[in-house]
Image (cartoon, rainbow, N blue to C red):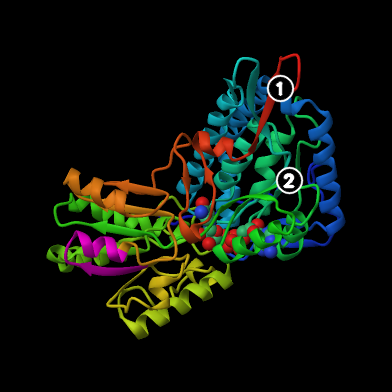
Amino acid sequence: MTFTRPPWTAPALDHDFVHATGQVTDDLDPATGAVVAQVRQATAADVDTAVRRARTAFARSGWRNDGALRARVLSRYAQQLREHTDDLAELLTREQGKTLGEARSEIAGSASMVDYYAGLARAVYGRAIALGDTAHGVILREPAGVVAVITPWNWPLTLLERSLAPALAAGNACVVKPASLTPAITVAGLALLAADPELPGGILTCVTGPGHEIGDALVGHRDVDMVAFTGESVTGAQVMRMAAGQAKKVALELGGKSPNIVFADANLDKALDGALNAIFTTSGQICTAGSRLLVEAAIYDEFTESLVKRAGQLRLGDPLDPDTTLGPLVSASQARTVTEYISLGRAEGTLLAGGGEPQGGILSTGHFVAPAVIADLPPDSRVVREEVFGPVLTVHRFADDAEAIRLAEDTEFGLAAGIWTRDLDRAWRVGRAVRSGTVWINTYHHFYPEAEVGGFRGSGPGRQQGVDGLLEFTETKHLNFDSSATLW
Ligand code: NAD
């Protein structure tokens, strides 16, 4: 059966909450090169307008003090996301290149995230404490103010909601800067929220455009109180430096090079599925990608052989086709970068799978890269040390727990890790030893709005999701009362 792409009507992206008066650029489908949408870019003046609107709305609208209002608005937004799953998922697949199945699960996850924070919007509790006979302290959690939410292109809606929903739930006003490669899905998702009749004007604004211009203008704006940034570690460090100039609060969710450790006593079938899911989800363009597979020596040959076989069975193709398991990479430049890493891996190690240019039909027009598995790389290879952000897995052999931990920890990042074993004591021991924000045991890539995520080391400071994810967007204030007759 041949699959035919359905016809496409580009979405209208002109909305009052989007501040953009600059040039219009074409937003391209990475599978076909067709125009998905036309996007007007913001200017520095637009950034100023958006931030000022947000500042005014924060100061005057009453949003920050009305948890019940915030809960209602967010709850309806979650519902809207669910009701528009079909349209949003198709737009996401066309713009980003991920498979339609993954796009649908991204919409569902986004709605669930918003729902979770809708619940917490009425639970931004402080504390009270007696400080002697006459003094009392009331510790309040207040919204940070105007929050710039800067998002990446790989999971553009989930990673948007992961910052936006808690920021709004805590009572902030938000200015969103979508990634340059995924403005259409971001604006389409936000439009559902902006249309809510109870959302005060200015509490949500958006500016589209390149990071080095529009992102910089936003981060450097004096009326932005906090920056929630998700993206590359190098960009995150730049954002941090710029924010430091104004001693501005930041939450940074950055890159990773996550180890996925398979012990010989694991359920190997499940671990194989887990290893493939860990690296090939979103064609490897995921911050938590289990890109370094560490396999115990006793099963290394057998496990690697099965893995290579299974990688070869993954179906590259049109991401709108339900039979496709791997879509294109997001852009020509991303595909070029990843291909260069594969060439380097081939030169420095043994290429067990992948390489070559996928050809035929859509594979020739789109930015496709076949899944690659590379062994025998030296520990200082750039392919082992740097975040590739593509379907490239390096495999490594270890002798015992100590060596597994040493290899896992031989990285500048600390975002995630996987451990596959039936030995509970070992799972605890290794899980505690690996310094990562998330450690999955006998699973991988399962996320829950209730559970915090974030990084150690180069993966960035800050936590998102869960209760900590809400508190990130607050400032702590102590109101101190004294009822004594004299000061001393
Ligand atoms: P990126 O750093 O290139 O861009 C992220 C966002 O920052 C975009 O909106 C971009 O326009 C903007 N930006 C770029 N330069 C800027 C500047 N100077 N000032 C302000 N904003 C600027 O990242 P990307 O390529 O979009 O996304 C991929 C990266 O994101 C990977 O490194 C990945 O690991 C990381 N990521 C991390 C997480 C996490 O939770 N830790 C999640 C997803 C992606």
Q: Residue 111 carries which label?
A: none
In the rendered image, which quarter contains the N terminus?
Answer: bottom left
**Whole-percent x, y for residue 153 in the image:** 59, 56
Secondary structure category for the residue under label 2: loop
Residue 35 appears anywhere in the view: no
Q: Which residue is drawn at 32% across and 57% down?
A: 276
Tell me the magenta residue range. 393-407
Q: Is residue 402 above or below residue 150?
A: below
Does label 1 point to a residue whose CB lies under 8 Å from ligand 1? no
Residue 352 seen by the camera: yes
| 3D distance between C-alphas at marks 2 and 1 | 20 Å
Instruction: Identify which amino acid the numbered label 2 is placed on.
Output: Asp
Q: Which residue is drawn at 34% across and 84% down?
A: 348
Q: 431 or 289: nearer the eye? A: 431
Query: Please, what is the three-letter code of the amino acid marked with disc 1?
Result: Asp
Direction from residue 340 to residue 270 in the image, left or right: left
Neighbour class for label 2 at 10 Å: few (<14), some, many (≥20)?
many
Relative height, residue 249 to residue 327 (above, below): above
- Seen as rendered, the residue at the extreme bottom is 347
| Mark earlier in primary sequence (2, 1) | 1
- Report the image quarter containing ligand 1: bottom right
- Which residue is painted at 40% across and 48% down in the image? 438
Q: Rate crowding at label 1 as few (under 14), some (14 to 19) or many (20 or more) other CA atoms within 10 Å.
A: some
Q: Where is residue 304 in the image (x, y as percent from the top left)?
A: 22, 66
Q: In this view, does 267 lie to the left or right of 444?
A: left
For disc 2, the marked residue is: 225
